[in-house]
Amino acid sequence: MVLDLWHICKFYLGLLATILVLLAWTTNLVAKPLATIFGGSVTLVGMGIAYVTYARTKQQGYVAVPITHGEEYLPGSLLAVLVADDVHNERRQVITARNVYAHPWNDFWYGGLNYQIEHHLFPSMPRNNLKKAQKVVKAFCQEHEISYYETSVARSYKEILSFLHGIGTPLRKQALHTQG
């Protein structure tokens, strides 16, 4: 009973947080349009990177995002909830994320979150320590034959845009067919 109440509270708190973020973005769009557009575009690119990684991992035959009991609170959603005592949690965290190569500029630009693999494994770790954790995680992945994906900024954008172009192709063809 208490656990069910907690899940309901978490859902509505998440919904409230989303509404507040949208309100803040809308307010900032009026007050600081260039900064808001820039921040929004970076957010969308990040979401695109996550989706491309998800699609690539799913194509390789892995279940990239486990669906759990949380779906009853938000039907049709995919939740990144890991199952307690599952020996595959770490593997899932690594194969469903990717890093942008380490470089002082990338570290500054992404605020340390270019180390997505380490961030997913250790979400409460301070961002300035993620680079140190990367050495340990890479060695662990190599030892246990877990795919560790790292790419350049340009390549990550190319992958995102290629994927988005690919999934948009049927819609473009349908629009051309309807017009013609």
Image (spheres, rainbow, N blue to C red):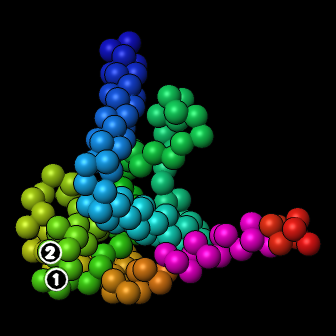
Say whether residue 112 is left or right of residue 5.
left
Residue type (three-letter) at the residue carrying disc 2: Phe
Query: Which residue lies under the disc numbered 1?
Result: 105
> How far from the left and from the top, in percent, is residue 21?
31, 41
Q: Are marks 2 and 1 in contact (CB under 8 Å)?
A: yes
> How far from the left and from the top, in percent, is residue 76?
60, 40
> How far from the left and from the top, in percent, is residue 2?
33, 15
Q: Specify the farthest residue to the front.
A: 30
Residue 108 - label:
2
Q: Specify the farthest residue to the right.
A: 180
Identified at 54% across, 29% down, the residue is 72
SS label for mark 1: helix
Residue type (three-letter) at the residue carrying disc 1: Trp
Residues shaded magenta: 160-173
Task: For the C terminus, give its image quadrant.
Answer: bottom right
Identified at 49% across, 39% down, the residue is 68
Say if residue 87 shows up in the picture: no
Question: Which quarter of the picture shows residue 5?
Answer: top left
Residue in front for this viewpoint, 38 or 67: 38
Residue in front for this viewpoint, 109 or 78: 109
